[in-house]
Amino acid sequence: MTILSALRSMVRRSSIDDREAFAVLSPEEIPMCTVDELLIMDKIQSSKSKKDQFLMFCTINKLDQHMALYDEIERYKKADISHKKYISYTINDLFLRERATFRVSLDLDTNLLYRIDRATRHEQIPIDELAIVENLNIKRICHIYQKFEKTPMHKRW
């Protein structure tokens, strides 16, 4: 089921709770989405360019530092392990400053979107751990966070 068809389904069944309307979607595809998040995800995923996808996300969410965020995330993806922690704090700081409230893609190749608001602002979870905050499918993100590949499944949560 596509994002748009899920939205149409929700509109037809407007008397029910949002969560119940999205129950037909797999957790890996769209974990715990709101209506606004679904609309944003649909716009982002329909864009051709990776950079455009990211800038669109930032524009929708009124993130003034979006170019800085994009550059930092690109640096993070290319950095070696010793520099990732430092860069992750920079990314966290940019998000905290802009008070982002939806999802952002750290892996623009797969459009895997992360909930960063609660994780960074309220719970102070490092960016390396954001992938597991919403119980996302580890197999889809282990190429970003290689340490998860060697960690036994029962110790990842």
Image: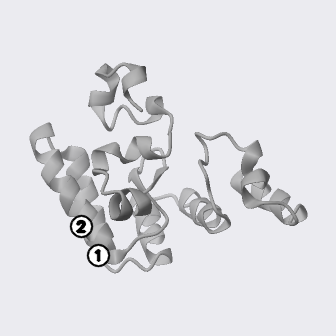
Q: Determine whether, in the image, residue 9 is placed left or right of residue 104.
A: right
Circle 1 residue: 97
Residue beneath the point at 78% across and 60% down: 17
Q: Position of residue 138 (x, y in %)?
A: 45, 32
- Depicted 142 relative to depicted 23: above or below: above
Three-letter residue code for mark 1: Arg
Cα separation between marks 1 and 2: 6 Å
In this view, the residue in front, 5 or 26, is 26
Is residue 1 visible in this depiction of the protein? Answer: no
Neighbor class of circle 1 (other Cα within 10 Å; few <14, some 14-19, many 20+) is: few
Question: SS at mark 1?
Answer: helix
Three-letter residue code for mark 2: Asp
Residue 33 lies in quadrant: bottom right
In this view, the residue in front, 31 or 124, is 124
In contact (CB < 8 Å): disc 1 and disc 2:
yes
Residue beneath the point at 62% across and 41% down: 27
The way the protein has been coloured in the rendering is one colour
